Amino acid sequence: MKESSYAEMKEVPPFVRYVASGNMKDKPVDDVKWSGDSAAPPAIGSEVYVKMNAIGWARVVCYFVQDGWLGVKVQPHDPPEWYIKQNGGNCECHAFGAELGEAPAAKKGAA
């Protein structure tokens, strides 16, 4: 079994954009891959919506690469109660590009 790799950085490393339609078949397997809908990861300090596990709005604090995949380390603004209970109220989390997205539209009748 291959050992896992992880590194954090303040600058975006060279990467290729991964699109599930198969644009990776001609790319070297050693390239760092970005899975987001955007052409590039958001800048440090940007506000992003982490749709994974309903984390919600967060601020990008740095980049990371884990096992060849590029992601962002973020500071959630108002994480769900389960997240606070599991990690504490001021804990950063990791999100890959595919885990970022548009905030859900407010439900009708919501204040």
Image: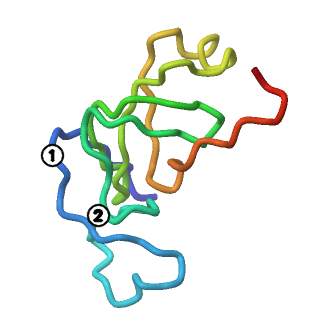
Query: Which residue is drawn at the image coordinates 28% and 81% (left, top)?
Result: 28
Q: Farthest residue in the bottom direction?
A: 26
Residue under the image location 84 percent in, 28 percent down: 109
Determine which quarter of the picture holds residue 70. Answer: bottom left
Residue at the location (15% across, 46% down)? 11
Q: Position of residue 110 (x, y in %)?
A: 79, 26
Question: Horizontal and vertical percent for residue 2?
Answer: 40, 58
Numbered disc in front, either 2 or 1: 1
- The colour scheme used here is rainbow
Residue 23 falls left or right of residue 60: right
Residue type of the residue flagged with mark 1: Glu
Residue named by callout 1: 11
Question: Is residue 87 depicted above or below 27 in this figure?
Answer: above
In primary-sequence order, the first of circles 2 and 1 is 1
Rounded to the nearest angstrom, the CA distance separating label 2 from label 1 is: 14 Å
Q: Name the residue type under label 2.
A: Val
Which secondary structure lies at badge 1? loop
Q: Position of residue 47 (x, y in %)?
A: 39, 35
At 41% from the left and 88% from the top, the residue drawn is: 25
Above or below 25: residue 79: above
Residue closer to the observer: 91 or 4: 91
Q: Element at badge 2? A: loop
Q: Which quarter of the picture shows residue 103?
A: top right
Residue highlighted by disc 2: 32
Q: Residue furthest left?
A: 11
For label 2, the crowd category at 10 Å Cα-Cα, with few meaning under 14, some 14 to 19 and many 20 or more, is: some
The residue closer to the viewer here, 61 or 26, is 61
* Vertical comparison of 87 with 21: above or below: above
